[in-house]
Image (spheres, rainbow, N blue to C red):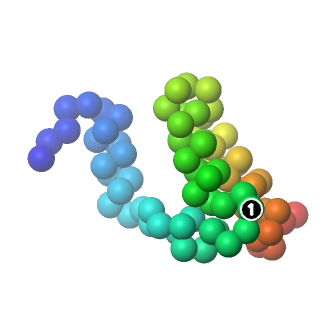
Amino acid sequence: MTLSDPMLAEVAKLNETSMPYITAVHFRYETPTGSELLQSGVQKMMAGSMTPAEVGASLTQGISRYFKPFQK
């Protein structure tokens, strides 16, 4: 399949090496869950109110409340 939309083509390329369920598997037992943070962030990114970098930072910050490796 060939994607004509450049954004969809870029996302498809990312899916070749992504790990889509890591937030569901490792970050679902505390609040906020990784899924909650990611879903909210992606919606904001698609609406144009957040950049991908901001979504990543928000996800990291939210998870850092209970995931020690993300705590500074």
Q: Is residue 14 above or below residue 47?
A: below
Residue behind mark 1: 31
Front-most of residues 17 and 22: 22
Q: Position of residue 52 (x, y in %)?
A: 57, 40
Residue 35 in picture, x, y percent from top left: 58, 57
| Residue 43 percent coordinates (x, y) | 53, 37
At x 38%, y 53%, the residue is: 14
Does dot 1 land on a helix, a strand or a loop? loop
- Residue 67 left/right relative to 3: right
Q: Residue furthest left?
A: 1
Identify the residue at horizontal 82%, vertical 62% (top origin): 65
Q: Which residue appears at 31% of the width and 38% of the height?
A: 8
| Quadrant assignment, res 61 | bottom right
Instruction: Name which residue lies at 45% across and 62% down.
Output: 20
Q: Amino acid at mark 1?
A: Thr
Residue 33 occupies quadrant: bottom right
Residue 60 sits above or below residue 6 on the image: below
Is 57 rendered above or below residue 45?
below
Tell me: 61 left or right of 27.
Answer: right
